[in-house]
Image (cartoon, rainbow, N blue to C red):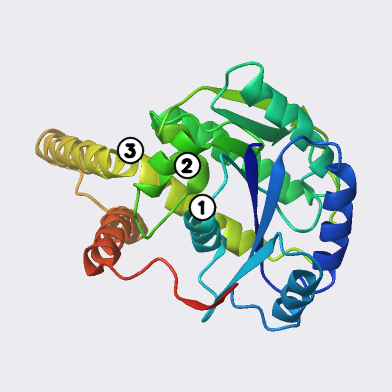
Amino acid sequence: MKKLSVIVPCYNEEAATPLFYETFIQKTADMAVEFELIFVDDGSKDGTLAAFRALRDRDERVHYISFSRNFGKESAMFAGLEAAQGDYIAIMDVDLQDPPELLPQMLEGIEQEGFDCVATRRVTRKGEPKVRSFFARQFYKLINHISKTEIVDGARDFRLMTRQMVNSILELKEVSRFSKGLFSWVGYQTKWLEYENVERVAGETKWNFWKLLVYSIDGIIGFSTAPLALASVMGVVFCLLAFLLMLYFLIKTIFWGDPVAGFPALICIILLLGGIQLFSVGVLGQYLSKTYLETKKRPIYIAKERC
């Protein structure tokens, strides 16, 4: 019998963990595979780890990894992928926004239809703030326009993959991880399942607008050099513009005797050029900072406890 490893990253999910386990066991009871559940505690400050231990005492198919501190969901997913022993590997959120009842259909897509990965995407963002939904859609449009790596709008981390695909992902040891891009970058045939957004069963989301913004910047920097090209193009454009303006004012003064006036205009130009320079330096700084982090070769996570 084939084995399915299910990775469940968690951060302060004490209330959701038992509910996820009961629902998962109920919805997947008829699947003809052997299971292992790998919970990853991303440095939780509540009783999440205790909930893992309690589930382990009840069911030997439950395993867990507890980090020494909060390393982030990307690190938690990577740790789960490293620990997974199954022929197929799935990643799910513990809040049940990723419906376990889709797993049989996802497994069929791999075993019967020959896909290497069956992934999910939301077709609605019901229950999500409108501002966040708007910026999320704009992010997907932007990154697909400037990157060669396609990232599907509404794509979730919830997916089922073959062992071969997971092994390819594990070869990518970069510290600044953007898994939606990495899943696409390694290639392989992917089937997409669409479903409507589901409200979380318990607890609160850990992703506020600022964290999502930083995460999106990581994605753009990790999979596109377009911002660097933009900074270069803006430098050339404004150099040409400055030259044309100097030529205009010189001709105007010589032929019409009209001296250049306007202290406010001068201040505006200085502020504009200063802003462009700071923007360009900021873009360079982002790429340099990522390079700096990668060269230090620190571990992606530190596990304090395993079972």
What secondary structure is marked by label 3? Answer: helix
What type is the residue that disc 3 sits on?
Ala
Nearest the viewer among 233 and 263 is 233
Question: Is the residue 12 above or below the residue 143 in the image?
Answer: below
Q: Position of residue 278 (x, y in %)?
A: 30, 60
Nearest the viewer among 144 and 107 is 107
What secondary structure is marked by label 1? Answer: helix
**Which residue is identified by label 1?**
81
**Which residue is identified by label 3?**
226
Q: Quadrant of the C terminus?
A: bottom right
- Is residue 23 in view? yes
Q: In this rendering, which labeled residue sits more in front, label 2 or label 3?
A: 2
Question: Is the residue 199 above or below the residue 105 in the image?
Answer: below
Instruction: Say left or right for 53 vs 151.
Output: right
Q: Which mark is residue 119?
A: none
**Which residue is identified by label 2?**
166
Instruction: Say left or right for 29 vs 242.
Output: right
Nearest the viewer among 290 and 86 is 86
Q: Are marks 2 and 1 in contact (CB under 8 Å)?
A: yes
The residue depicted at 34 percent of the width and 60 percent of the height is 271
